Each structure stands twice: as structure tokens, then as C-alpha cells.
Amino acid sequence: MALYLRLPATAGFNINNELIVISAFNANEAEQSLLGQDVNIIASGPSVQQLALSELLDTPTIFVNGSLSLTRQHQFTHVAGYVISDARFINHQPEILHQYYTGQPLYATLAVFEAMATTHPDIMRTYHHAMRVLYPVDRPWGVKSNKLSFNKLIFKKKRLNKKMPLSYFINHPNFVIDSSHSSTEIGVSLNVTHGFVEAGTVAYVATQLAFSRHAATIHLYGIDLLNSDQPRFYENNNNRAPSTLNKVMNERIVPSFNLLSRSYKAHGVTVINHSPVSKSLFDDL
């Protein structure tokens, strides 16, 4: 029987010689439950610009990366979360946090928080109680920044940076792993307290979080994929960040979302993709 790494319950960061502690996500926390409500997840695809957002404002909403900027002009009544899984977003779009983050529940990887400890120390210091760490199950450290070297994390991260094959977790009760996929192993988490599975897009992380928080139906917006050569809805041609969606779309993103949809439906939760751009890509979404 495999011995699974126990993920740290907290992470401490040294910010100007002050210890800032952030708790890991725990689905057993009462405040984390969505209480069987529907939830909207708004990603960053250009199709978001065509949404009738006034019809979505009263549903609990999880934002990812730059979609949080929608809160500037629209009064969402329940911001259920904000998810960042890749530290490179912090470097490419640092102004998003400065302009739009005001203490909404933030879920991010260790690498993201370590980047923020350097680039946004005041935000970390002020709002750390509203933040939760999410761990990728196969490499708990997460996607590192490709520009800067950060050393704010208190505990040693070497053991968290060892990448494990997803097949190692095939018998874990909180994961569904498919090792038979032709190009790469794919999987999905049933409870991100024990880690999430990556698929090349932060929206996949947010969807696993929504399921873990006991959402009823999960509605996905802005997961366009096919127009990743265009700027995200909050970008322009001058400030757009690189996208790797084209490289991983068919190998990981599409089969992973199909697996996720089937797995969650078996547990009574329906996931619906509302993007008119990518709708035809999926068999089960």
C-alpha cells in the first residue's frame, strides 16, 4: 500500500522579519462549504466579454487570475473565491491584485504565495486570514516563477518539490486517476484538502475546489481554449501574457475535463461549460 505524503496544515512566510501564517485548505472548515448552492466559475477567455453578467451576479462566483477585474464594474453579491495556481501570473499581471483584491477568499499554491510575499507583501500581511494554500498532489510546491528566485517560505521546500507520477495515487480514495490515456496520465481530485490535479489551466483547479466545497451545479464561463492566440478579456496586445493552452489542450485539458465531468456526475454534481467557443471540444461537459 502506498504511503501518501501528509500535506502541511499551514505555511509560514517571512515578510520583513514578520511571520505570516496561511492555513491550507480544509474542506471540513464550516466556512468553506458552499452549502449545496450552484456556483459560477469565470475564467479569462475572450467570450467573457459577451456574457450577460447582470444575470450571474447573485450566484456564488469563483474568479481565476485576471477575471477578478470584473468586480470593478459589476456588483457580485457572493465572491466565493479567487484562485491563482501559477506564480507566473503574479509577475505578468501584478496590477490585478493591487487594483482588485480586497480580501476575497484567495486560494493559491505555495509558489504563488511566495511570489506574493515579495511582490505584494502588504496584501499578504493584511489579508492572510482570508487565504488558503492549495497543493498540487503530484508536486506540492506548485509551478514556480520563471523570472525570480523567492526565499520567503519558512519550512524547507525540497521534499515538496519532488514530482510524483499520478499513477502513484491511483488507489487513493480522494482521486480518480486515468493512466490509460494515450499521451499522459490524467486525474481529478474529489477533495482538494488532499491536493488537486493539474491539467494546464487554472480553471481546472477552480472546478476541483468548487466540488470540494460542496457545490450543487458548477457552471464554467470563459474556458474558450480555441482562441488562446487572442488576448485574455482583461488584456490587450501590449500586455498579454504567454499562453500554453494550445500545447496542452488536446493532450490534457480536454480529456481531463471529460474525466472530471463524468466523475463528479457520478457523485451527483453536474458541470456545465457555457463557452460557445469550446463547447464542441468536450464529450461530457
Image (cartoon, rainbow, N blue to C red):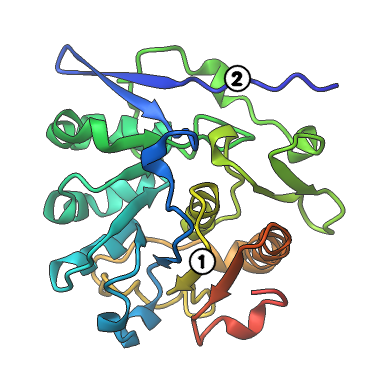
Quarter of the view holding residue 264: bottom right
**Distance Cα–Cα, label 2 vs label 1:** 29 Å
Q: Residues within 10 Å of mark 2 (few under 14, many from 20)?
A: few
On the image, numbered disc 2 is attached to which residue? 6
Quarter of the view holding residue 163: top right
Mark 2 or 1, nearer chain start? 2
Q: Position of residue 228 (x, y in %)?
A: 47, 74
Q: Quadrant of the C terminus?
A: bottom right
Element carrying mark 2? loop
- For image coordinates 56% across by 55% down, the residue present is 200
Q: Nearer the viewer, residue 106 or 84?
A: 106
Give the answer, above or below, for where 273 lies relative to 157.
Answer: below
Q: Residues within 10 Å of mark 1 (few under 14, many from 20)?
A: many
- For image coordinates 72% across by 61% down, the residue present is 259
Q: Position of residue 85 (x, y in %)?
A: 43, 46
Element carrying mark 1? strand
